[in-house]
Amino acid sequence: MAVSLAWLVYVALGAVAGVLAGLLGIGGGLVLVAALVFLLPSQGVPTEIAVHAALATALGSIVLTGLSSARAHHRRGSVMWPTVGWLLPGLLLGGWLGAWLATRIDGGFLRGFIAIYCALAGLQLALDWPRSRPERADIPRGPGYAAAGGLIGAVSALVGIGGGSMTVPLLVWRGVRPVLAVGTSSACGVAIAIASAAGYASHGPEAGVMPSPSWGYVFVPAAIGIAAASVLTAPLGTRLAHRLPPLTLRRLFAAFLWIVAASLWFAG
């Protein structure tokens, strides 16, 4: 693929991921990983490590996407920072360890794992599960959230996401309003992405295996192109999240995730 065309594709992917990050707090990373698995080999990434590079690159771009989305939600008062603080240690440790584990797993197995996760995330969206409990006034906090953060961070690193498909349902089940759950999840996603991307960079392949410029498994041009567009569109998704009934959009995106899952599974 020509360099100029590749940049256009990265920008388009970033625009979609940014809107999804702000709107649903879920799914942007899954879209990026699925697309990058197929795109990166055309940029010189060896096929056998394309899945690892896709995960690392998606997470690298999510750092800036998450910052933009979290900032927009914070300005609207929809980030519960005390809850973020309790989740943070687990998110950082889990993200780092998950990336380390992923670099030691065969790419074909990882592809199948991501496909299954996409299918399950689509099911969760379609069923609108878990249902919101009666709203509670107290802010979720406590050591249990630190432990939950570790699991969320590790799984997120293995599938290349900011953790929204786990953080949002957890908080909604806890009785948090969905818009607050999405806002809080966006802030958590920044921590996951930083720790995971650093893990993939630190445990990257030998010099010369990835095309230049790369940082470990992170293919820098793709990460920059995606992030540049997603930073601009994440606030749009945030505004829509505060205005639109999300159920129809969630179900449409669920169908899209099932298509992504099928493409990853059968392409392997």
Image: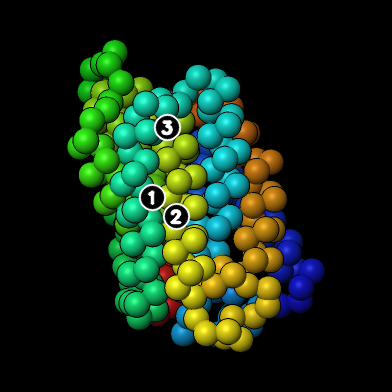
Residues under numbered marks 3 and 2 in contact, where contact means CB atoms less than 8 Å apart: no
Between marks 3 and 2 in the image, the one whose residue lies nearer the viewer:
2
Residue 106 visible in the snapshot:
yes
Going 29% across and 54% down the picture, which residue do you hit? 120
Q: Amino acid under label 1?
A: Leu
Compared to residue 202, the image places residue 246 above or below, namely above
Label 1: element kind:
helix
In front: 237, or 80?
80
Task: First in sequence, mark 3 or 2: give its number.
Answer: 3
Q: Amino acid under label 3?
A: Thr
What residue did someone put label 3 on? Answer: 184
Residues under numbered marks 1 and 2 in contact, where contact means CB atoms less than 8 Å apart: yes
Query: How far from the left and from the top, in percent, is residue 123?
Result: 30, 49
What residue did someone put label 1 on? Answer: 92
Gap between marks 1 and 2 measured at Cα:
5 Å
Q: Amino acid under label 2?
A: Ala
Query: How far from the left and from the top, in percent, is residue 18?
Result: 59, 44
Q: Residues within 10 Å of mark 1 (few under 14, many from 20)?
A: many
Q: How is the image coloured?
A: rainbow
Query: How far from the left and from the top, in percent, is residue 163?
Result: 39, 47
Q: Quadrant of the N terminus?
A: bottom right
Residues under numbered marks 3 and 1 in contact, where contact means CB atoms less than 8 Å apart: no
Going 59% across and 70% down the picture, which residue do you hit? 215
Compared to residue 212, the image places residue 121 above or below, namely above
Query: How far from the left and from the top, in percent, is residue 59?
Result: 50, 57
In front: 179, or 144?
144
The extreme left residue here reads 144
Task: First in sequence, mark 1 or 2: give its number.
Answer: 1
Q: Is residue 219 left or right of residue 257?
A: right
Label 2: element kind:
helix
What residue did someone put label 2 on? Answer: 195
Q: Residues within 10 Å of mark 2 (few under 14, many from 20)?
A: many
